[in-house]
Image (cartoon, coloured by chain):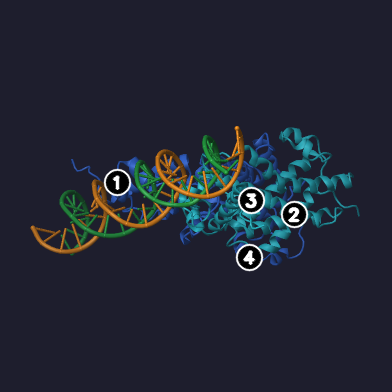
Chain colours: A blue, B cyan, C green, D orange
DNA sequence: CCTATTGCAAGAGCACCGCTCTCGTTTCTC
DNA sequence: GAGAAACGAGAGCGGTGCTCTTGCAATAGG
């Protein structure tokens, strides 16, 4: 009964988790480029070479943190939207946008890690793509659902602009949504993350005094461009 | 007449210029976080400690590169706009946006330096603010000029939304422009740089096939939100 | 013109970094 | 129980930012 010593596999999982959480903490202080494997080891009471048993290189550790960050942001957005009535598309968009912004402000170093300047020479592995699309899917689904609900006339149903834009992969992602709206959906996505990046990276300093109100305004404006007009 | 030996001041200016250009070259290869003073010195045939005669710290060198980058981007945008007829506001906006995007693609590492993740702990000195506002001013002036030219009815001249948004410093910057348009001006600014960042940092991979056409579409869309409707 | 001051490059050195390798020890697997 | 695999410790390599000292060259003042 006294065999509560963790097995090798358990110990390994625990070490990996500790390394990642310690890295997140240190990254919050000195930023991603300042993250040091030696410091992580020191913090854990380990010798530096021991870390390499779990992450063969610094980039591998960063990749793991990137995947975690994408997933973390993804679930935050998913949960925020799920708390909203499926009929209130504008409300869902506001909830999603607000959750993204909130997550970014709560985890600035991780946001910078995934949406800031990529490290030159660092090529994101294949398996980081799927977690990365998670937030994007949340936004895309809000728009798609809104158009499925009321497939009436929407804003500007001009010709086949989408084909001209040569968007790819969007056909399956946003079925039943006009091409223009699909393109505007990309703009919504860009606007939200552009806003968050500008706010977090300090580019609004001097021009935006109340970021909360401005953010609400922005989401209102972009919502009108991608959601079908409510019948009045 | 044989005194073409450079004076001390000349030599110093030349060394500073060489250090900066060498740094830019190396930064293009390994990125800003990978920029190494020792490597710069090595490349110049200098011993590493000599660099500190010109830049007392690595951050000071980075600051100099940041200021140069802001100014470089600023003049690029200014020149692009000047080549356009002042009456064609949409054309001017397209020119400005295109020049920003072009500069970013030509100088990706410098773009990442000023619009990517800021280094935690690094506080941008006061004198970097003015060069930073240069591009922004170009965009703001396009909108302001357009409204000065035809101060007729524009899009959505609702109440004093601007006061609610608590934008600051915008009163002097965009005189005669409705508050809503001022706020949308910030959105235009955000959208352009959000687009360029997303494109440069690889977030559009998988969803945008022809970025050129999509960019034109985006600029068309945002132009409509901030420029007074042309009389028809 | 000669001297005192200043600017400069060189070199050694400090503490840090990512990463590799070896060496005992512990744990798992057959 | 024996062999294999995983693990932590430690030394070591070449790199980093940065400091300090030393000797020389260019400038400035008398």
Q: Which residue is mark 3?
A: B69
Q: Are marks 2 and 4 on the same chain?
A: yes
- Cα distance in 3D space between marks 2 and 4: 23 Å
In the rendered structure, are the residues bearing label 2 and label 3 in contact, judged by CB atoms less than 8 Å apart?
A: no
* Identity of the residue drawn at 72% across and 34% down: B168
- Cα distance in 3D space between marks 1 and 4: 47 Å
* Identity of the residue drawn at 74% across and 54% down: B96
Q: Are marks 3 and 1 on the same chain?
A: no
Q: Are marks 1 and 4 on the same chain?
A: no
Q: Chain of mark 3?
A: B
- Quadrant of image for the N terminus of chain B: bottom right
Left or right: where B131 falls relative to C28: right
* Identity of the residue drawn at 18% across and 40% down: A2
Residue A164, position as x, y percentages in the image? 71, 66
- Quadrant of image for the C terminus of chain B: bottom right
Q: Which residue is mark 2?
A: B96
The residue closer to the viewer here, A90 or A219, is A219
Residue B97, position as x, y percentages in the image? 72, 55
| Mark nearer the viewer, 3 or 1 | 3
Q: Which residue is mark 4?
A: B209
- Cα distance in 3D space between marks 3 and 4: 29 Å
For marks 2 and 4 on the same chain, the one whose residue lies earlier in the sequence: 2
| Mark nearer the viewer, 1 or 4 | 1
Q: Which residue is mark 1?
A: A47
In the rendered structure, are the residues bearing label 1 and label 4 in contact, judged by CB atoms less than 8 Å apart?
A: no
């Amino acid at each position: 009964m006294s065999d509560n010593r963790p097995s090798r596999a358990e110990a390994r999982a625990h070490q990996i988790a500790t390394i990642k959480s310690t890295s997140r903490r240190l990254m919050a202080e000195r930023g991603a480029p300042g993250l040091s494997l030696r410091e992580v080891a020191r913090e854990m009471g380990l010798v530096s070479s021991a870390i390499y048993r779990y992450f063969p290189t610094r980039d591998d550790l960063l990749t793991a943190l990137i995947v975690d960050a994408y997933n973390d942001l993804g679930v935050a957005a998913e949960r925020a939207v799920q708390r909203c009535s499926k009929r209130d598309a504008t409300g869902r968009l506001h909830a999603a946008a607000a959750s993204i912004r909130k997550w970014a402000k709560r985890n600035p170093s991780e946001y910078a890690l995934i949406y800031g300047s990529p490290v030159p020479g660092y090529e994101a592995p294949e398996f980081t793509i799927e977690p990365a699309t998670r937030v994007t899917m949340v936004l895309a689904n809000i728009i798609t659902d809104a158009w499925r609900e009321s497939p009436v006339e929407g804003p500007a149903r001009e010709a086949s602009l989408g084909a001209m834009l040569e968007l790819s992969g969007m056909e399956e992602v946003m079925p039943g949504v006009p091409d223009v709206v699909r393109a505007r959906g990309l703009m919504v996505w860009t606007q939200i993350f552009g806003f968050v990046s500008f706010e977090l990276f300090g580019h609004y300093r001097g021009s935006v005094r109340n970021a909360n109100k401005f953010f609400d305004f922005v989401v209102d404006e972009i919502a009108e461009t991608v959601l079908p007009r409510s019948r009045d």
